[in-house]
């Protein structure tokens, strides 16, 4: 926690006598002409240098989910043409994450591979190159407004799911990497892989750029969907050349950290070193099976009752830090205020609060100004830390039964098609769903 820090401290140095540290806001939001002198935290180091120096890198949140809710990406295909169609919407999301304290502006290139852009009848008139180039351009623009690094990322491909060759899959990754090199991103990420084999192929392609490579799998403690353990996955990612490894998406913060603990132990037993990275869901998913939240019946349109509070995320940030994770961010469900919660929890370690905290007040401190005295009584850490929030849904159970069709890469059912799913195909799927559930 950060005792005594609140929005009213904007622009002031705030001494934490018991910790002998000083916290400042990096920018000058809300200062009048008589504003206090600020110490802007300036970093000019690169990605790996920051990690080597022990700096906490804060990632951003879940772009695709956030933009879907705002009407700019489409659930189902989840592809990111928004970078070309509505750059202003993407720019605004980046700015919110930057203001919340994110160190990385990850270009919105998730599922921006050529095969995914064409998949399931989703054939934008916009090319793979255009989508990736525009995303990098916007990320650079916003990163320059603060102190952020720019990353480009590749993710799992329909080509791999359809059992195509290693050369075919690698050619897909190469097309995105060509853009990242031209746009000179600071580092590259291989993220959201369900199978470590595909992630290895991605890393091998990304390494040819000579840029630092981070790699995350969307796995939990049970390992990847081909049955490779979490520990073995970490070992294989590092041996493929990733300098930063971990997990993203598919599982809640607690489950994700359990997976990372296993990965860390695997690396230690193999005598390998890597920085650790965690970008979990912003949802509570203790009932997930091996496939993660996409098997939950609420995925993707009714997950809201599972949403993590800002206080849950502060707890996650602290636990991640204690585990040795130094790249801490979020994925689907993570909004800017969740990223701010990470920045506030780790403000002492980082030496500053983000601009977004100017209108917050750590641990509810801002409520000291509330009209009602019983709400003012909530302006304390102890209150929010102990609260068990109600869902407000009297007929809702706390957990669900995952769907669990149990098929993955190598199974014919996962062969991807470029045409839209037909009505007849959908009818068969509806019938099968009834039989399984
Ligand atoms: Zn996600």
Image: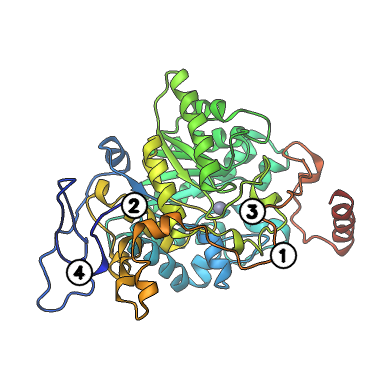
Looking at the image, do the residues carrying marks 2 and 3 touch, with CB atoms under 8 Å apart? no
Pair 2/1: label in front: 1
Mark 4 and mark 3 in contact (Cβ < 8 Å)? no
Residue 59, above or below 319: below
Residue placed under numbered mark 2 in the picture:
345
Q: Quick one: SS at disc 1?
A: loop
Q: How far is mark 2 from mark 3, CA to CA? A: 37 Å
Q: Which residue is mark 1?
A: 395
Q: Which label was assigned to residue 28?
A: 4
Q: Nearer the viewer, mark 2 or mark 3?
A: 2
User: What is the spatial separation of the Cα atoms under label 2 and label 1, in whole angstroms?
Assistant: 34 Å
Considering every residue shown, the one lying at the far bottom of the view is 371
Say which label, 2 or 1, has the lower sequence index. Answer: 2
Give the Cα separation between the discs numbered 1 and 3.
Answer: 39 Å
Mark with earlier residue (1, 3): 3
Q: Is residue 59 left or right of residue 344?
A: right
Residue 215: image location, x then y, percent: 48, 39
Q: Which residue is mark 3?
A: 116
């Amino acid at each position: 926690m950060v005792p005594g820090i609140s929005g009213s401290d904007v622009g002031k140095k705030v001494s934490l006598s018991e910790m002998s540290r000083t916290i400042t806001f990096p920018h000058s939001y809300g200062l009048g002409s008589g504003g206090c002198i600020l110490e802007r935290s300036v970093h000019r180091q690169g990605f790996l240098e920051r990690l080597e120096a022990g700096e906490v890198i804060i990632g951003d949140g879940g772009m695709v989910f956030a933009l879907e809710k705002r009407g700019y990406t489409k659930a189902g295909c989840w592809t990111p043409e928004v970078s070309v169609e509505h750059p202003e919407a993407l720019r605004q999301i980046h700015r919110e994450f930057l203001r919340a304290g994110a160190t990385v502006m990850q270009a919105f290139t998730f599922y921006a591979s050529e095969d995914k852009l064409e998949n399931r009848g989703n054939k934008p008139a916009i090319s793979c190159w255009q989508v990736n180039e525009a995303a990098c351009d916007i990320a650079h623009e916003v990163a320059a407004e603060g102190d952020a690094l720019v990353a480009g990322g590749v993710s799992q491909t329909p080509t791999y799911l359809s059992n195509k060759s290693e050369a075919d899959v690698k050619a897909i990754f190469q097309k995105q990497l060509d853009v990242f090199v031209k746009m000179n991103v600071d580092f590259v990420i291989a993220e959201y892989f369900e199978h470590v084999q595909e992630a290895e192929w991605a890393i091998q392609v990304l390494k040819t750029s000579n840029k630092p490579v981070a790699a995350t799998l969307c796995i939990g403690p049970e390992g990847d969907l081909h049955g490779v353990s979490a520990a073995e996955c970490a070992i294989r990612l590092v041996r493929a050349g990733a300098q930063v490894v971990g997990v993203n998406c598919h599982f809640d913060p607690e489950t994700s950290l359990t997976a990372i603990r296993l990965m860390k132990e695997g690396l230690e037993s193999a005598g390998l070193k890597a920085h650790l990275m965690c970008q979990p869901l912003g949802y509570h998913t203790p009932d997930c099976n091996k496939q993660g939240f996409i098997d939950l019946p609420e995925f993707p349109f009714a997950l809201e009752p599972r949403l993590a509070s800002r206080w849950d995320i502060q707890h996650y940030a602290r636990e991640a830090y204690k585990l040795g994770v130094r790249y801490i961010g979020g994925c689907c469900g993570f909004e800017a205020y969740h990223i701010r919660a990470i920045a506030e929890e780790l403000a002492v370690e980082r030496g500053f609060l983000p601009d977004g905290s100017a209108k917050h007040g750590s641990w509810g401190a801002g409520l000291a100004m509330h009209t009602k005295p019983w709400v003012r009584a909530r302006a304390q850490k102890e209150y929010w830390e102990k609260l068990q929030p109600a869902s407000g849904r009297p007929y809702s159970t706390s957990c669900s039964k995952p769907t669990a069709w149990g098929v993955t890469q190598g199974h014919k059912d996962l062969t991807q098609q470029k045409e839209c799913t037909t009505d007849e195909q959908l009818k068969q799927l509806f019938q099968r769903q009834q039989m399984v559930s």
